[in-house]
Image: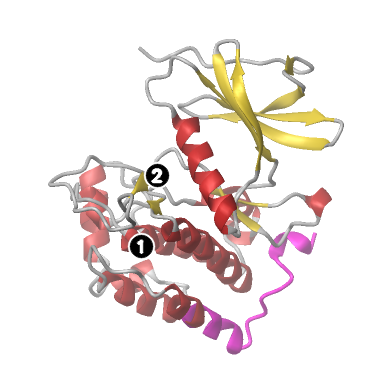
Amino acid sequence: MAQELVQLQPRQKVDKWAIVRKLGEGGFGAVYKVSDPSGEYALKVEGVSEAIQVLKMEVFVLNELAQRGGRHFCKIYDKGRFGTFNYVVMTLVGKSLQDLRKEGPGGHMSLGTAVSVGIQSLEALEDLHSIGYLHRDVKPGNYTIGRVELRELRKVYVLDFGMCRKFTNEQGVIRKPRQAAGFRGTVRYAPISCHLQRELCRKDDVETWLYQQVELTTGNLPWKNIQDMNQVGEYKKKCRNQPFVAELFAGCPPIYESVMRLCDNYKYYDAPDYVKIYGMMRTIFAQGVPEFPYDWEKN
């Protein structure tokens, strides 16, 4: 049975943090904007009796990233238990890439903006992979920009580590893949391996990132209206060959297809060549597409 979500009211206090308003809720619990004399923050809560403790993973991953100087991650300011729930206080961020995409003309970003935030989004995955974790739920709703007040409109953050999985053991060696792994993530963006219930690896996060990249650039993924998970998987496989490749990358720079081919050649134990992919993406700027200002800075 699903647990009752923790509901907090404005002006209520959680230890020293005053609730301002609710920002959203997921299957795990809710996120609130909170304040104290030093400023405004985000408070994530999760019932103590939840079967899967998502916040614990979140705190663990963010602490490890902080020690390694991760570039695109929220900072943790406080954590604890209050009444019937656990909470974490972290950096308050701005709008998601999903919302920003939808606000753009035609429901997509300009090419320069899409490529630039895409490079930052991949840097976040590179940092996560460097500490031995896969994200496994890469999507525009899990990336945001920073806040206007902090002049962070050009900074991209990655959020939500509840689906993360450690792919290395204590010695830093890559674990052997399980025979079968359940579906994890979001059907629209999931990698082909996920549809085949195969163990995911670093290249799968990159494949998912590329689908996100296409959507940010054009506002479209060809399978977006298909409900059946298996049919979506089949469609993604078809998009490796013509005429479906052309459909997937319609409106995208040709280099996107080259990135897909590079990614498709990686095997389970391979580390993606992130630097090479950044370089490929940056050729778009070299062709005269302006990187800045970002779309949302022009208003």
Neighbour tally class for label 1: few under 14, some 14-19, many 20 plus, Cα within 10 Å: many
Please give the name of the residue rendered at 39% of the width and 63% of the height, measured from the top-left corner: 206
Please give the name of the residue rendered at 70% of the width and 64% of the height, measured from the top-left corner: 295
Vertical arrangement, residue 15 with respect to residue 39, above or below: above
In the image, taking residue 129 as reference, residue 45 lies left or right, namely right
The magenta span reads 280-299
Q: Which residue is mark 2?
A: 164
Q: Which residue is mark 1?
A: 207
Judging depth in this view, the residue of 245 and 54 nearest the camera is 54
Where is residue 180, by image quadrant?
top left
Looking at the rendered structure, which numbered label has been put on residue 40?
Answer: none
- Where is residue 218 drawn, in percent x and y? 50, 65
Vertical arrangement, residue 254 with respect to residue 155, above or below: below
- Where is residue 80 drawn, in percent x and y? 60, 24
**Does label 1 or label 2 sit earlier along the sequence?**
2
In the image, taking residue 162 as reference, residue 247 lies left or right, namely left
- Where is residue 40 drawn, in percent x and y? 78, 36
